[in-house]
Image (spheres, grey):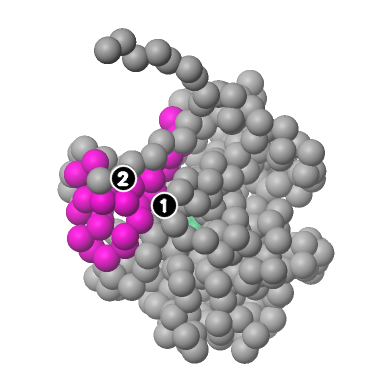
C-alpha cells in the first residue's frame, strides 16, 4: 500500500452558482484531495488546521475514509478558514467573494512521524510557506512531490510560491493561473517557462475543456467527460489533484506513461465532483460508478484512423 501525505485547507465554503446558493458547507483543498485519493490503495494523512467551530462530523467523514488526521490541529477558540465564490454562467470562471484565513494565518504544520517518508507528497492549495515547511520536515526526499496552488497565493505571496515551486516535481495549475504565473498566453510556452522554474512535469487544467500534461516535448491531453448536469465546479481542481496523486502513490511508478493514467484518474473523479454542490457527490461514490466512467473515458478518446500514404 502506498503512502500519501496531503497538506491543504480544511474549510467552510459558501458557493453561488447559476443553479443555487449554499450556506457554509464543508470545503477545502485537503478535503477534496483526501476524498478523491481514498479510492486508491493508499494510506493517506492530512496536515491542516481548523478552529473549534469545525464540526466533528466533518472530521469523522474523513477519518471513516481511513485518512490519518493526527496532523490536523484544532485551535481552541479559533475560526476555520472560510472561502466564498460566485460562478459565472459558463461555470468555467468564478469570482472569489471572500477569503478569510483565520487559523491558517498562524499555522505551523507538524508532519506525523509515520508520514515523514511518504511515496508521494500532495502539497494542496494553501500558503506556500506551509507547503515548504512540510517538505522541510521529511526525513528523505520522496520520489514525487506535487504542488497545486491558485491566484490568491500568486497575488499575495509570489516570492515564497516561486521558491517552493523550485523544489517540486509536478505543478498542477489551471489555465488562467498558468498565464498569470508566466505572463505567457500560449499554454505551451507557459508550460516551458514552468519547467524552467523547477517542475519536470506540468499539468494545466482547463475545466470543462480537459487537462494537458507536459514533460519537455512530450504532451498528453485528456478531455473532460461531457456531462449532462454540472452544478458546482468547486473542488474539481483539488479532486483532480487527489485522484492524480492517489493513483501515483498506489502504483509507485512515476514514468510519463503512468502520469498519463494519473491524469485520466484525476479527470474521472473530478467529473463526479461537479455534479452536486460541495463534497456531496464525492461522499457517496461507488467503485462501480468510477469504473463505468473510466470505460466512458476510454471510448471517448479511441479512434481508428487510416493514414493515407
Ligand atoms: P478548486 O475549485 O479546486 O480550485 O478549489 C476550491 C476549494 O479551495 C474550496 O473548497 C476552498 O475552500 C479552497 N480554497 C479557496 N481559496 C483558497 C486559498 N486561497 N487557499 C487554500 N484553499 C482555498
Q: Is residue 22 above or below residue 247?
A: above
The residue that mark 2 highlights is 218
Q: Is residue 230 above or below residue 264?
A: above
Look at 56% across and 33% down and name the residue there. 17
Q: Dot 2: within a 10 Å radius of its alpha carbon, few (fewer than 14), some, or many (20 or more) residues? A: few
Can residue 200 be seen by looking at this rendering? yes
Quote the CA–CA distance across marks 2 and 1.
8 Å
Q: Quadrant of the C terminus?
A: top left
Q: Is residue 282 above or below residue 223?
A: below
Residue 276 image point, x, y percent = 68, 37
N-terminal-most mark, 2 or 1: 2
> Contact, CB < 8 Å: mark 2 with mark 1?
yes
The residue that mark 1 highlights is 256
Depth order, front residue of 197/110: 197
Residue 15 image point, x, y percent = 58, 43
- Magenta residues? 188-216
Amino acid at each position: 500500500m502506498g503512502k500519501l501525505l496531503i497538506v491543504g485547507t480544511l474549510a467552510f465554503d459558501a458557493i453561488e452558482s447559476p443553479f443555487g446558493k449554499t450556506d457554509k458547507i464543508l470545503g477545502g483543498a485537503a478535503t477534496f484531495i483526501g476524498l478523491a485519493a481514498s479510492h486508491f490503495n493508499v494510506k493517506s494523512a492530512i496536515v491542516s488546521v481548523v478552529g473549534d467551530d469545525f464540526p466533528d462530523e466533518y472530521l469523522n467523514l474523513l477519518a471513516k475514509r481511513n485518512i490519518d488526521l493526527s496532523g490536523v490541529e484544532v485551535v481552541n477558540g479559533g475560526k476555520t478558514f472560510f472561502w466564498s465564490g460566485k460562478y459565472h454562467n459558463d461555470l468555467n470562471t468564478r469570482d472569489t467573494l471572500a477569503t478569510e484565513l483565520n487559523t491558517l494565518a498562524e499555522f505551523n504544520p507538524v508532519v506525523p512521524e509515520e508520514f515523514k517518508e511518504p511515496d508521494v507528497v500532495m502539497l494542496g492549495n494553501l500558503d506556500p510557506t506551509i507547503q515548504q515547511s512540510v517538505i522541510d520536515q521529511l526525513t528523505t526526499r520522496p520520489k514525487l512531490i506535487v504542488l497545486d496552488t491558485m491566484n490568491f497565493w500568486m497575488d499575495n505571496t509570489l516570492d515564497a510560491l516561486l521558491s517552493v515551486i523550485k523544489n517540486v516535481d509536478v505543478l498542477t495549475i489551471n489555465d488562467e493561473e498558468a498565464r498569470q504565473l508566466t505572463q505567457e498566453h500560449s499554454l505551451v510556452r507557459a508550460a516551458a517557462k514552468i519547467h524552467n522554474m523547477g517542475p519536470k512535469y506540468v499539468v494545466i487544467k482547463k475545466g470543462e475543456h480537459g487537462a494537458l500534461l507536459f514533460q519537455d516535448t512530450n504532451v498528453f491531453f485528456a478531455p473532460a467527460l461531457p456531462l449532462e448536469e454540472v452544478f458546482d465546479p468547486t473542488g474539481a481542481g483539488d479532486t483532480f489533484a487527489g485522484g492524480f496523486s492517489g493513483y501515483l502513490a498506489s502504483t509507485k511508478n512515476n514514468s510519463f506513461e503512468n502520469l498519463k493514467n494519473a491524469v485520466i484518474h484525476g479527470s474521472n473523479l473530478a467529473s463526479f465532483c461537479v455534479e452536486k454542490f460541495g463534497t456531496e457527490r464525492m461522499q457517496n461514490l461507488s467503485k462501480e460508478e468510477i469504473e463505468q466512467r473510466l470505460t466512458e473515458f476510454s471510448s471517448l478518446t479511441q479512434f481508428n484512423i487510416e493514414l493515407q500514404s
